[in-house]
Image (cartoon, grey):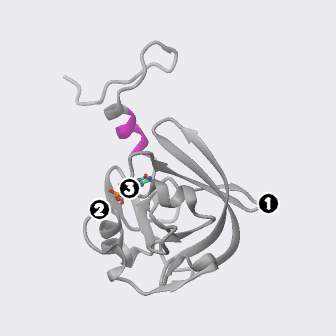
Amino acid sequence: MSSQPEAQSANDPLTPPTSQALRAALGRFATGVTLITCRDTAGQAVGLTANSFSSLSLDPPLVLWSLRKASSNLVAFEAAGHFVVNVLAETQVELSRRFASSKGDKFAEGHWADGLGGVPVLSGCAAVFECQTEVRHDAGDHVLFIGRVLRLTDLSVAPLLFQGGHYRMMGEVL
Ligand SMILES: Cc1cc2nc3c(=O)[nH]c(=O)nc-3n(C[C@H](O)[C@H](O)[C@H](O)COP(=O)(O)O)c2cc1C
């Protein structure tokens, strides 16, 4: 008996992957962890933990991320002209857990300042990308956000990682 997960043929278009299989395979792809923030139309700070962040273009400087349509944060991000991608340092795992939950005041922990457009910027991050919302795309059960990077901060501290459903720290350089 093999304990290997069932391999799925890439040549069989009639068998879409189950959500569980897709999630497991995507979990093989290691990412950083970000807190993405904005202000809602009432001026309230809004944010969530997201690992869908990715680089997109150097010229012009564009980045992307995606937000679940069912998220309580969707209305705020759809209306916001700016958002900030706070790339977490390995010391900030508790903030990641906090911003992945719907409970409580997410911004009660951490040192926050107002960046461009008044959007909350977190101190001590590995990097910060302050963005203007460039494009939104409907994408399945998510909305894809593309932002133009207006200002960045690079603190050169070790980033927090996420892989296989676990938070991790940087390992060996190969
Ligand atoms: C490591 C990690 C990465 C996540 N990445 C995303 C993401 O890219 N997009 C997203 O919509 N939700 C993502 N989530 C889930 C949101 O953080 C979570 O649904 C949200 O904070 C809950 O708030 P809400 O109930 O107000 O939507 C992620 C969660 C974790 C733990």
| Residue linked to disc 2 | 102
| Residue linked to disc 1 | 60
Asked whether mark 1 lies closer than 8 Å to ligand 1, one says no
Characterize the local packing of mark 1: few (<14), some (14-19) or many (20 or more) Cα atoms within 10 angstroms.
few
| Residue linked to disc 3 | 72
Q: Secondary structure at mark 2?
A: loop
Query: Left or right: where does residue 91 sit relative to residue 153?
Result: left
What are the residue bounds of the magenta stretch?
Answer: 22-28
Q: Disc 1, disc 2: CB below 8 Å? A: no
Characterize the local packing of mark 2: few (<14), some (14-19) or many (20 or more) Cα atoms within 10 angstroms.
few
- Please name which of the two marks, 3 or 2, marks the residue nearer to the observer: 3
Query: Left or right: where does residue 1 sit relative to residue 31?
Result: left
Rounded to the nearest angstrom, the CA distance separating label 1 from label 3 is 31 Å
Q: Which label number is shown at residue 164?
A: none
The percent position of residue 7, horizontal first and vertical second, equals 38, 24
Front residue of 171 and 148: 148
Q: Disc 3, disc 2: CB below 8 Å? A: yes
Q: Residue at x 43, y 58 (%)?
A: 73
Asked whether mark 3 lies closer than 8 Å to ligand 1, one says yes
Task: Determine if residue 85 is in view.
Answer: yes
Q: Secondary structure at mark 3?
A: loop
Asked whether mark 2 lies closer than 8 Å to ligand 1, one says yes
User: What's under tag 1, amino acid-wise?
Assistant: Pro
User: What's under tag 3, amino acid-wise?
Assistant: Ser
